Amino acid sequence: MLTAINLSGIFVLDQDEALDFYVGKLGLEISADVDLGFMRWLTVRVPGDGARDILLELPGGPAHDDATAEQVRELVSKGATGFSVGFTTDDCRKTYEESSAKGVEFNEEPAEHPYRTDCGGRDPFGNHFRIVQLATSQ
């Protein structure tokens, strides 16, 4: 029986630029940065969350041939890969303001819903992300 998710991956087009965005602007931390020779294994996580990492993966080998890697790059750039990652926060509006001040571009401002307050944006490559403040029980 599965007990948890410990790794998810998103395709990025430049790993150093991805680090600048996810670590420098969104405030994640590097959990691994390893040169495997055939690829760079680069993962980030929410500070203090040692259970879940996000692999910032370049399209290409060993998983893709050149033609497939190019198709993946095109899809990512168009934002056609769909929802990539969701984060939770204790204060969505504050996180939105702080992230915006650091240059994060949002396509949805914080909005109230019965079960959450959330906002959405894209990383520099086109991947969709959401930041969610879950509603407190009444």
Image: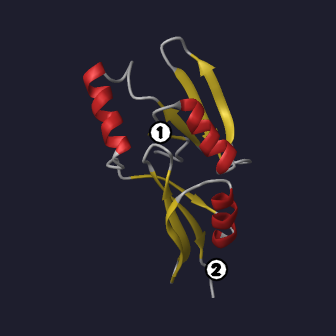
Query: Quick check: can you spot residue 37?
Result: yes
Cα separation, mark 2 vs mark 1, equals: 30 Å
Give the mark toward the camera: 2 or 1: 1
Q: Quadrant of residue 100?
A: bottom right
Residue visible at 63% across and 88% down?
138
Q: Which mark is residue 9?
A: 1
Q: Position of residue 27 (x, y in %)?
A: 69, 49
Q: Nearer the viewer, residue 106 or 10?
A: 106
In the image, 75 versus 32, the foreground residue is 75
| Amino acid type of the residue that numbered disc 2 sits on in the rendered structure | Thr
Q: Earlier in the sequence, mark 2 or mark 1?
A: 1
Residue type indicated by callout 1: Gly
Q: State the residue position of label 2.
A: 136
Residue drawn at (32%, 27%), measured in percent from left and top? 69
Q: Residue at x 65, y 29 (%)?
A: 32
Q: Residue at image x 54%, y 21%? A: 40
Percent x, y for residue 46?
66, 48
Position of residue 15 measured from the top left corner of the image (x, y, whole percent): 55, 31
- Callout 2 environment at 10 Å: few (<14), some (14 to 19), or many (20+)? few
In the depicted structure, whether residue 71 falls above or below residue 83:
above
